[in-house]
Structure formats: structure tokens, C-alpha cells
Image (tube, helix red, strand yellow):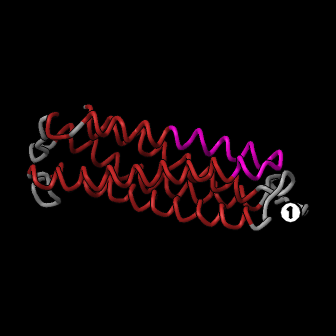
Amino acid sequence: MSTQVAETSTGISHAKLGIWTFLASEIMLFGGLVSAYVILRSGSAHMAIPPREMMGVPLATFNTFALITSSVTMVLALAAIKVNDMKRFARFIGMTIGGGILFLCIKSYEYNHKWHEGITLSSNLFGSFYYTLTGLHVIHVIGGILLLLYILVTGLNGAYDAHNHERVEAAGLYWHFVDLVWVILFPILYLL
């Protein structure tokens, strides 16, 4: 199944232009929230930072590793589809989805633990930012998993091949963005 990819006046495909435009809006969303957090953290008396022991840094570090690994498997899935290796494509997309699900499982455990430790949405300014930033990220991880499930199912039904993999590439860009957001959130929320 080979289809002609329509080019835009910019010289890149509609799928790539669309995903980059969407990601630009997401950068503005997360950028505004992260900037507000950093500014308030550095200058607000109401920003009581919990002790590092309460934050669960080792678990969050493992979660970071899970997401970074899922980015690697996404790259491998795209490489597999580019050579029409559907078995490897399905395996690596499945591993990427698994990494996202593992992240969500650990995050739900972490939320429960933090809640019982007294870090809640209304406990203080840090709690509000913590749950807003990580909750928004969790929503994006869930969206990414759903997108990857769609890519997996449609891929197994013959929608993609070596000449037609724009959607896989766009889904990969989204997944890498989700991982990059976490790589920014992890140090500012857990390590600083």
C-alpha cells in the first residue's frame, strides 16, 4: 500500500506540519505553567517545599527511566515500519505502550502515597502546582497511549508501510514531546 504524501507550501507534509503546530501550542501550555511554578518557587513565601524523603525520588527516577526507554522503543517502531517489518513494529509499539502504562501505574501509586503524606491539591502552593503539572502530564500520557493503540491496530490492519508512515512518525513526535515534558518536570519537582 503506497500512497502519495501531499506536500504543503512549506515543503513538509500536512501530518508533520499539523503535529508541530499542535506541539507548539502544548509547549506554550506547559511553558506557562512551568514558568509560573519556577517564579513562585524562587520568590513566594507560600511555596513550602516538602522534604525530599516525602517526594519519592527513587520511584520518580525509575518512572523517568521507563518513559525514556519508551521513547527509544518508539524510535525502533518507526525504524521497523520503514523497512516493512510489521512484527518488530508491533513489538516495539507494544513496548512503548507498556512503558506508558508502567508510568501511569507508578504515578497512581505515587499520588496515593503523597496524598497520605499530606501533599494534596489544597495543602499548599507546591501541592497545587505538583498535581496540576503532573496531572496535566498524566492526561497527555493517557492520550499518547490511546494514540499509540490506534497506530498499532491500524498498522496491523495494513495502514502503514515503508512508503506510508507519516502517522507513525507524527505519533512518535507526540510521544517524544510527552517524554520531554517529564524530563523537565522531574528535576524541577523532585530534585531542586
List the residue tagged with mark 1.
Answer: 6
Q: Position of residue 70 (x, y in %)?
A: 53, 43
Q: Quadrant of the N terminus?
A: bottom right
Of residue 45 and residue 12, the one placed in the foreground of this image is 12
Q: Is residue 182 left or right of residue 191?
A: right
Q: Residue 14: which quarter of the image?
A: bottom right
Dot 1: within a 10 Å radius of its alpha carbon, few (fewer than 14), some, or many (20 or more) residues? few
Tell me what residue is drawn at x 64 percent, y 49 percent.
91
Of residue 62 and residue 11, the one placed in the foreground of this image is 62
Q: Amino acid at mark 1?
A: Ala
Q: How many marks?
A: 1
> Does the magenta segment cover residue 183?
no
Q: Position of residue 113 (x, y in %)?
A: 17, 51
Residue occupying the far front of the picture:
87
Tell me what residue is drawn at x 45 percent, y 57 percent.
141
Q: Position of residue 53 (x, y in %)?
A: 14, 34
Majority secondary structure of magenta residues: helix
Q: Residue 187: which quarter of the image?
A: top left
Tell me what residue is drawn at x 71 percent, y 59 percent.
167
Q: Quadrant of the C terminus?
A: top left
Q: Position of residue 48 (x, y in %)?
A: 10, 43
Q: Is residue 186 left or right of residue 165?
A: left
Of residue 158 and residue 60, the one placed in the foreground of this image is 158
> Does the magenta segment cover residue 81?
yes
Residue extent of the magenta highlight: 69-89
Q: Secondary structure at mark 1?
A: loop
